[in-house]
Amino acid sequence: MLEQNTIDALAQELRYARENRKQVSHFSKRYPEMTIEDGYEIQRAWVRLELAAGRTIKGRKIGLTSRAMQQASQITEPDFAPLMDDMFFKQGDIAINQFIKPRVEVELAFVLKQSLKGPNTTLEDVLAATDYVVPAIEIIDARIEQFDSVTQAPRKVFDTISDFAANAGIVMGDVQIKPDAVDLRWIGALLLKNNVVEETGLAAGVLNHPAVGVAWLANKIAPYGEQLNAGDVVLAGSFTRPTTAEVGDEFVVDYGSLGIISFRFV
């Protein structure tokens, strides 16, 4: 376990990196003894800095929910991070200079009407506690270098967890779906960048049902005395690969009968 002063210093690095849009080197390279729990401790320290600066937590995101991404990261379970209030963006133009190297993923967001507290939360509990599900786009970013500037080695999952699980933004659609109105597993979407289909996917790619990840999260945070609260927005995990973005790129996610989400980086 890293020393608390080290954890606090690394959290400060991340906050500075986000504010100044300048990436930092891999924590796991500097501290080879670093563990997943260290990653979450750094993340929590960064959250405390954001709260002290006046930010609020509006929900959570779950990442690494697909089998392929878990294998690539050499882990056996998802990761998670908070959704801060300044990470919510409306459709339309979004200033790209708020990010460093943004990428885009397709997800479903669960908006809760009741709290969920582990350790025994089930998929059925999640559906009962959900007010509605809404199509969404997650904007991910890397305050820690994705590839080491010297060795080109990819960052480790410990780095990603520290870095808010790569979370940077969310854009929500307009169509609200009651959780029992459709089979959520079969919700599909097309991700277009500049009128070209880059990715397609089904929500079943998220642990075979997107609500499974929400149940996992409620159970995972329970030992820390935390829970998912009524009103929280929970991003359940991507069912497409991340798509790179540059200034001028226009993204459209077509959910068929569930509507379209669109925005442009300016």
Image (tube, rainbow, N blue to C red):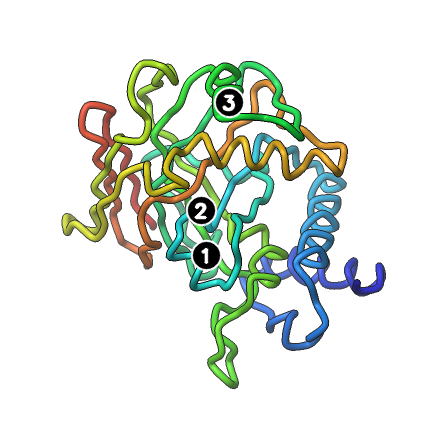
- Left or right: where does residue 53 sit relative to residue 260? right
Which label was assigned to residue 70? 1
Q: How many marks?
A: 3
**Badge 1: few (under 14), some or many (20 or more) residues near its Cα, within 10 Å?**
some
Q: Is residue 260 above or below residue 252?
A: above
Q: Is residue 191 above or below residue 89?
A: below
Disc 1 to disc 2, how far (Cα)? 7 Å
Where is residue 158 shown, x and y percent of the image? 61, 62
Please say if the residues under marks 1 and 3 sit with CB atoms less than 8 Å apart. Answer: no
**What residue is shown at x 28% (from left), y 34% (from top)?**
261
- Left or right: where does residue 47 sit relative to residue 171? right
From the image, tell me which residue sits under label 2. Answer: 65
Which of the two labelled residues, at mark 3 and mark 2, occupies the earlier sequence position? 2
Disc 3 to disc 2, how far (Cα)? 17 Å
**What residue is shown at x 37% (from left), y 57% (from top)?**
68
**Badge 2: few (under 14), some or many (20 or more) residues near its Cα, within 10 Å?**
many
- Describe the element under mark 3 as helix, strand or loop: helix
Where is residue 105 shown, x and y percent of the image? 36, 47
**What residue is shown at x 79% (from left), y 58% (from top)?**
8
